[in-house]
Amino acid sequence: MIINFQPHPKIQLPTVNDAIEMLDRLGKRLEKKTVRSVQQLPKIGIGKEFALKIAARNAERITWIEAVKSQLENGSQELNQGRRQCVSNHV
């Protein structure tokens, strides 16, 4: 059984560029949240330790987001190159 999915004509499906933009915004929001969280904690004792843990955890998350974003950008570029080659072969 083959299902042919036809989205509603007025609904625009997200693109790879939309995903890249969303990841970029997520990374920036996480950076701001990290700064705010660290600034609100005391600079001594357990507050300092907790701030370091927050910063380290969020740095890992931001690194992961950047890696996924890079993979999407590379994949998008490869798809575009493949499309150009396909079009030039048909012309």
Image: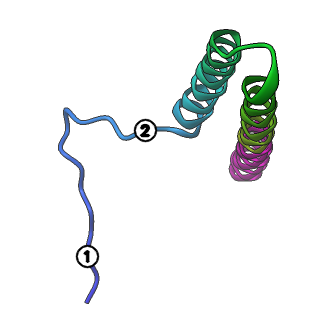
Q: Which mark is residue 52?
A: none
Secondary structure mostly seen in magenta is: helix
Residue at the outermost bottom position: 1
Expressed as whole percent of the image width and height from the top left, the position of residue 38 reads: 70, 17
Looking at the image, which residue is at 60% across and 19% down? 33
> Is residue 81 highlighted in magenta?
yes
Label 1 amino acid? Ile
> Is residue 48 highlighted in magenta?
no
Looking at the image, which residue is at 24% across and 36% down? 11
Kindly tell me whether residue 32 is visible in this rendering: yes
Query: In the visual, does 69 lie left or right of 44?
Result: left
Local packing at callout 1 (Cα closer than 10 Å; few below 14, some 14-19, many 20+) is few
Kindly tell me whether residue 91 is visible in this rendering: no
Q: Which residues are magenta?
A: 66-90
Q: Relative to the observer, which residue lies in front, 41 or 20? A: 41
Q: Relative to the observer, which residue lies in front, 66 or 91? A: 66
Q: Relative to the observer, which residue lies in front, 9 or 44? A: 44
Tell me the quarter of the picture where residue 51 sits: top right
Looking at the image, which residue is at 58% across and 28% down? 26
Label 1 vs label 2, nearer the camera: 2
Residue tagged 2: 14
Looking at the image, which residue is at 19% across and 32% down? 10
Element on which disc 1 rests = loop
Expressed as whole percent of the image width and height from the top left, the position of residue 45 reads: 80, 25
Q: Which mark is residue 3?
A: 1
Expressed as whole percent of the image width and height from the top left, the position of residue 6 reads: 24, 56
